[in-house]
Image (cartoon, rainbow, N blue to C red):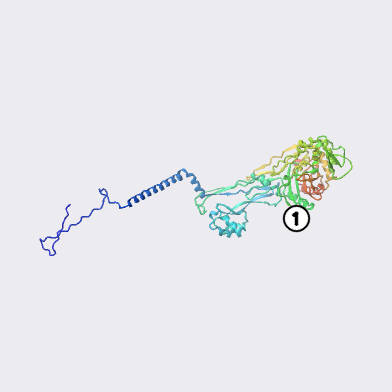
Amino acid sequence: MTVPTLTRRPSGGGRGRPVARTPIRPVRPPYRAGRRNPPALPLGGEAPKLRWRLVAMVVVLGAAFSTLIVRLVEVQGVSAGRFAVLGESQRVHEIDLPALRGSILDRNGAELALSINRPTVWADPSLVTDPAGAARALAPVLRLDELDLRARLSEAAAFVYLARRVDDETAAKVRALRLDGVELMDEPTRVLPAGAVGGTVLGQVGSDNDGLSGLEAQYDHLLTGKPGQVVVERDPSGRDIPGGVRQSRKPVRGSSLALTLDRDLQFVTEQALAAQITSSKAKAGVAIVMDPRTGEILAMASVLAGAKGQAPRPADYNKALIDVYEPGSVTKLVTLSAAIEEGAVRPTDVLAIPDKITVAGTTFVDAEPHPVRQWTPTDIMAESSNAGAITIAQRLGAANLDRYLRAYGMAGDTGLDFPGEASGIVPSLDDWSGTSLPTLAIGYGLAVTPLQMLSAYNTIANGGVFVAPSLVKQDIAPDGTVRPTPAPAEHRVVSAATAADITGMLTEVVRSGTGTTAAVDGYTVAGKTGTARKADSTGGYKEGAYVASFAGFLPAESPRLSAIVVLDDPQPYYGGLASAPVFSQLAAYAVRQYQVPPHPPANLDQSSATRP
């Protein structure tokens, strides 16, 4: 390569003098791609380090990108449905709207129980920004412990109750606080317009609007109704999203029940029973009033004595259907009617009856000592003679007595299907001992509910036909459709003639026998007293403890009303002194209430008569 030279002229500008030549170093042109010789890499160990860093970066980025692709495929493809549901669950909220419970009415349409909406305070803790402050503000308004409220407002939940069914004033105060995450909603509550009247029959309703006992539990499937629902779409702050999902389904009120009970008569029955428990110092009592022709229960009361001088109160459950007892002499109706029906004895027969009788080594005595009497079956019934009833039962025989006890409904249940209802207990004939016949003939050795015993008296009042008892007349759907309760089962137990004979005997009990205090002015009353010793759970009988009862019906010529009164351990303990007066009081009120004439004409069309 030739290097050019430059000639420098002398400063004086002379010509021809040689000028020194300085060579100029050539400049390397910049590296361009495609040249044979690339630029040299840095020297030393830096090149391998840089190379590994680049490789590591590529691997990490590749792995991250691959993970992102796999996750994207999973979210958008494989699990798309699950994540869509999860997202929707975070935005879309379902709010249940409780249905109002159906009402319970008496036979005349008066409300015994109904439901109304009351405000309930609740919270979504996930939306509560200051649990401590909210608890401090709510505690005095709701009258609740501040620490407890703070704990509830801090729960990991989307819904917690703070105070259920508060009054309107409290609800207004809570609303005025405008606390984040604290809301109010309407919730049904049960109201008893007549107070505790009929409460042991109606039963209880729980805090979640479900029936817990009594008719409320038995007919819960009808009374409950169908809850509604509101579906809304909300943002994370709990605000409704404009244009978001919003659907609603109105709740459907439950069906109502129309009972056979009469509210006014029920009130009078409870009051009369409570007064007698107080005056006789009884531990408890049961009273039932019925229409013997239809089996409809008009009143059913269960009352307990108050503690330490307090007034009597309603029992905790329906003792008339759930408790059983040995009825005593009121069972003699079964013994004598069976004997007359089977021809073992005639109403006009005269029998020599002592004041005691021994069977299989056991002596049974009458309540009062007396010499041997020449008594008819009517006399035996009127005087409530144990020896006389056993004498007649021996003529009747064990098999027949067992058959009639069952035909009168003493064994099994009543068919009401009332929650907790007890079945009557009558020993199997194969298990009878030598003393079973005399014992059962006078009302011992078996156990019945008060309603079962009254049903036997209804059978006689109804001309010998057993009619199953009933408590519900009909149910009424929300749209007004009425569904009557099926007619009760019936079967004949004794003939009309036998029923008439027994009715005559029962009227003598009230006219001149042990039940004179059951009389009602202007009416012929048929009935029977009962005084039975109380069984001991450890075996045998409690010393000095008795159950007093009276069961009967009126007017005897054309029975329209029947009743039974059972008192637990009254003083005095005789049925004629303790229970019969309450029967008289209830019967006198009932015949006025239903305008029952004392002596209806013989040609009166019973189908057109006023029915209670």
Number of other residues with Cα within 10 Å of mark 1, as a class: few under 14, some 14 to 19, many 20 or more: few
Q: Quadrant of the C terminus?
A: top right
In the depicted structure, whether residue 395 falls above or below residue 530: above
The picture places residue 173, in percent across and down from the top left corner, at 59, 59
In the displayed structure image, the side of residue 57 where residue 585 appears, left or right: right
Q: Residue at x 58, y 60 (%)?
A: 136
Q: Nearer the viewer, residue 73 or 382?
A: 73
In the depicted structure, whether residue 466 falls above or below residue 143: above
Q: Nearer the viewer, residue 498 or 351?
A: 351
What is the residue that sits farthest to the right in this orientation? 371
Q: Toward which corner of the image does residue 557 lie, by quadrant?
A: top right
The picture places residue 529, in percent across and down from the top left corner, at 81, 45
The picture places residue 589, in percent across and down from the top left corner, at 77, 49
The picture places residue 337, in percent across and down from the top left corner, at 81, 38
In the displayed structure image, the side of residue 382 where residue 193 appears, left or right: left
What is the residue that sits farthest to the left in this orientation? 16
Res 55 visible:
yes
In the depicted structure, whether residue 302 falls above or below residue 129: above
Q: Nearer the viewer, residue 612 or 539?
A: 539
In the displayed structure image, the side of residue 209 where residue 305 appears, left or right: right
Q: Secondary structure at mark 1?
A: loop
Q: Specify the amino acid type for callout 1.
A: Lys
Res 385 visible:
no
Tell me the residue that label 1 is attached to.
308
Q: Nearer the viewer, residue 345 or 393?
A: 393
